[in-house]
Amino acid sequence: MDFGLVLQTDPPASQVVSLMRRAERNGFRYGWTFDSAVLWQEPFVIYSQILEHTRLMRVGPMVTNPGTRTWEVTASTFATLNDMFGNRTVCGIGRGDSAMRVAGRKPNTLARLGEAIEAIRDLAEGREAEVDGAPVRLPWVREGSLPVWMAAYGPKALALAGQKADGFILQLADPYLTEWMVKAVRDAAAAAGRDPDAITICVAAPAYVGDDLAHARDQCRWFGGMVGNHVADLVGRYGEHSGMVPDELTEYIKARQGYDYSHHGRAGNPSTDFVPDEIVDRFCLLGPPEAHVRKLEALRELGVDQFAVYAMHDARESVIEAYGQHVIPVFRA
């Protein structure tokens, strides 16, 4: 199992680079960031510095979207970084939650997302693609490689990930829900004539190492609110108890009353008081190192290839060190 570190690009950017360097020293192979231009600094500028100051780490957004940048610009940016640093980028992509809503726009449709996945990958790898009805090609790309991993929760999005993406990003670490969603992605891949096992499975969630569970829960409760945004969309689309989405995912948002994106992804987010301890425990990894290992072993048995640690809490350095000393070595043995 690989490990990644996920950060927000809060200023100063030098701190983001420093934390990624620390992560690589501790065995993390992937460095991810949020991508929301209004809320945080521009991640692709920071990726160039992360790549410059690490040896092997791969970087990318968790996640970008097809709406805030034109597709040829996104592809060209990835291709430029790959040309400079040797194909060390991954394009995590989704419909767009905070990036689109904060700018006053709706998230992209799945149809548009599916078109963007193929176009961005083709362009970044030097092939011609159709962008807004016109053929486009980046003639300077040589031996480019850009895996595109799609974030998804609902049935139609999971099917699209299986049909078109190189990887699937699931932003929660509940084994029951992971099993259900991974199966949906792989079934869709098989139905599309693809090799289901060729799709990389990445689970991303907050991890907090320590014995004070009450404090850990409070530091990670924001995550249930972030996931709740996507769940609310699913309930709006499919209805409650529709059978399309497990009740274990949708039940907890009944007390959700709006969401303030100015606190998005931050510990102490006042918009996440509705998230119960049970959901924090299910969606996140909390407790001493051995508890993290047990849950990760269960996820690995379900086919998870990478666990990406959301480090949006007051113990970023210590969780990186704890994983480097006590968790990652178990999965590299």
Image (cartoon, grey):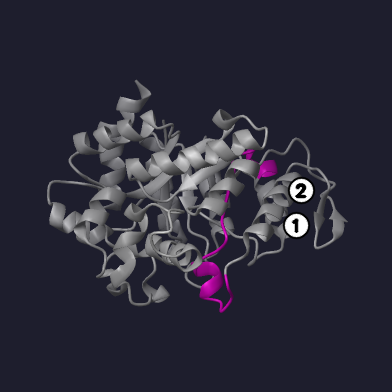
Residues at discs 1 and 2 in contact (Cβ within 8 Å): yes
Seen at 78% across and 38% down, the residue is 142
Residue 207 visible in the picture: no
Residue 174 visible in the picture: yes
Residue 180 falls within the magenta-colored stretch: no
**Is 246 on the left or on the right of 82, as rendered?**
left
Residue farthest toward the bottom in the current orientation of the protein: 104
Residue 40 rendering spot, x and y as whole percentages: 48, 67
Residue farthest toward the front in the current orientation of the protein: 242
Q: Which residue is mark 1?
A: 72
Three-letter amino acid code of the residue under disc 1: Glu
Three-letter amino acid code of the residue under disc 2: Leu
Residue farthest toward the top in the current orientation of the protein: 333
> Within the image, what quadrant is residue 225 found in?
bottom left
What segment is highlighted magenta in the picture?
Answer: 82-106
The residue lying toward the viewer, choosing from 223 and 323, is 223
The residue lying toward the viewer, choosing from 12 and 133, is 133
Residue 135 rendering spot, x and y as whole percentages: 87, 55
Q: Is residue 62 above or below residue 125?
A: below
Q: Quadrant of the N terminus?
A: top left
Seen at 82% across and 45% down, the residue is 140
Considering only order in the chain, which callout, 2 or 1, is on the residue closer to the N terminus?
1
**Is 316 on the left or on the right of 75, as rendered?**
left
The disc placed on residue 123 is: 2
How dense is the environment of label 1, judged by Cα within 10 Å: few (below 14), some, or many (20 and up)? many
